[in-house]
Amino acid sequence: MNDVCHNDAAYVLGALSPVDRQAYELHLRDCPDCRACVQRLAGMPGLLALTTAEAVEGPGPQVPPTLLPGLIARVGADRRRRRWLIGGALAASMAIVATLVSLLVLRAPTTAATTTAATTAAAEPLSMTQVLPGPMTASVELDAKKWGTAITVDCKYAEYADTSVSYDLAVIDIDGHVSQAGTWRAVAGASMRVATATSVPREHIAAVEVRLSNGRTILRTGP
């Protein structure tokens, strides 16, 4: 910016020397910014003429004694209102979090209890009835899986059980089809668990049989 541009106020107030005034007027011809400034300041001499020396040099207006306490009270009220708003928002947030936590805590035991009940029902032992007299008694657990059924046979053998005898586990589905699910040998005087499986879904199993190697059934679940 040209230094002449700073003479706008002095030009309007008539404070420039004749030489500077002539130079500034020549400058105004080519400077639209300075022309705009002069137009804005054109009314300043008239306003200054309406102001007396007493008004400028005399004491200013008295400040009401209640002004400062009123401002302090208003600022305090604004601060308290902001604290209440922030406190209320925090309390509401904490209440929402507490509600969500309570719901999760309440749902968790219910879900766990439901799962436990389902597992217990699925794995409940089924007694096997003796079809032929022998040294073996057993019960069977059927646990439904996505791929079929997990089977656990709890066997008890008398002391006189023949350890050379092998047993087969047969699964009969609701259509009468038979599939073999495992084989093992007796252990005299022992209790043992035989874990095996079948691809037949749990709900399609009509009966489970323990058979001798010649196909004769000695134990059976179901009707």
Image (cartoon, grey):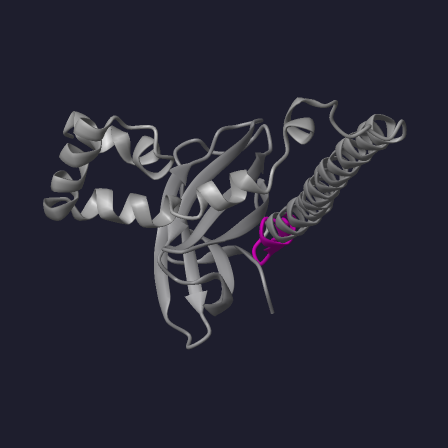
Q: Residue at x 56, y 31 (%)?
A: 160
**94 in relation to 182, above or below:** above
Whether residue 85 is visible to the viewer of this picture, yes or no, is: yes
Which span of residues is magenta-colored? 120-132
Viewer-proximal residue, 14 or 73? 14
Q: Residue 87 is drawn in which quadrant?
A: top right
Look at the image and say whether residue 122 sits in the magenta stretch.
yes
Percent across and percent down for residue 18 are 22, 30
Viewer-proximal residue, 75 or 180? 75
Viewer-proximal residue, 39 or 181? 39
Percent across and percent down for residue 113 are 69, 47
Look at the image and say whether residue 140 sits in the magenta stretch.
no
- Tell me the quadrant of the picture where the C terminus can be found: bottom right
Percent across and percent down for residue 70 are 85, 32
Side (left or right) of 44 relative to 17: right
Percent across and percent down for residue 68 are 82, 26
